Amino acid sequence: GENVEQHPSTLSVQEGDSAVIKCTYSDSASNYFPWYKQELGKRPQLIIDIRSNVGEKKDQRIAVTLNKTAKHFSLHITETQPEDSAVYFCAASPGNQFYFGTGTSLTVIP
Amino acid sequence: DSGVTQTPKHLITATGQRVTLRCSPRSGDLSVYWYQQSLDQGLQFLIQYYNGEERAKGNILERFSAQQFPDLHSELNLSSLELGDSALYFCASSEYTGNTEAFFGQGTRLTVV
């Protein structure tokens, strides 16, 4: 089955700096790649997603890039703010279930 | 509010007991997924149902079972509970299977004492 690896597991950045989280996947059939943000004690919430027919997608300060050849996708957060502090999960779906990465704990230092 | 409802929010029970967690998906969503999240851990996929039928199985213990009913709500049954089963259990739903956005419920925090 699909295997999703996510790095780094923890990330600390100064407020205003950029943060990048990287994920790799193994199943070439995966065609949908969502990113979820989970604040402490709360449910994961979708922040951005990308499909395999698109190489990049942006939504304000958040962007996701996908390299199908290399089987990796990345989340980019620019101008980070303290409220961006949370755990971020990437996921890949070959069309049935979702396979999640192990999560990245992002801390934005004011 | 994601539209996915999980009950109860908190559950404390003793080892060896059996509990049932309930999930009502968003209106119109046919797929339900169950995940287990232990402290500081990722989301471990347990099982998926689509329109009443089991579609995919993850690392679900034999002591655990689930079903999806005709009205599309789902229940996760955990039996012979052990201390290690203490975790946050999330239900998520999506319109179809896999490659559409999945919406998570608020989770049920299970504590086994």
Image (spheres, rainbow, N blue to C red):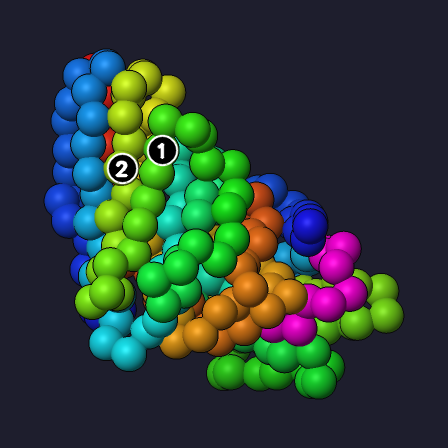
Residue A73's place in the image compared with A57, above or below, is above
Check if mark 2 and mark 1 are on a common chain: yes
B52 relative position to A60: left or right: left
Name the amino acid type tagged 1.
Phe
Q: Which residue is mark 1?
A: B64
Question: Mark 2: which secondary structure?
Answer: strand
Q: Which residue is mark 2?
A: B77
Q: Position of residue A6 (x, y in %)?
A: 65, 49
Q: In this view, which residue lies farthest toward the right?
A: A69
In front here: A1 or B86?
A1
Magenta stretch: dominant secondary structure: loop
Residue A8's place in the image compared with A80, above or below, is above
The span picked out in magenta is A24-32
Q: Is the C terminus of chain B in the top left, top right, bottom left or bottom right quadrant?
A: top left
Q: Position of residue A12 (x, y in %)?
A: 55, 47
Q: Position of residue A28 (x, y in %)?
A: 78, 65
Residue name at image x 54 percent, y 73 percent: B99
Residue name at image x 48 percent, y 57 percent: B55
B65 relative position to A28: left or right: left
In front here: A36 or A51?
A51
B102 relative position to A59: left or right: left
Q: Which image quadrant is residue B86 in? A: top left
Label 2 environment density (alpha carbons within 10 Å; few <14, some 14–19, many ≥20): some
| Mark 2 touches mark 1? (CB < 8 Å) | yes
Name the amino acid type tagged 2.
Asn
Q: Mark 2 vs mark 1: which is more N-terminal?
A: 1
Q: Which image quadrant is residue A85 in? A: bottom left
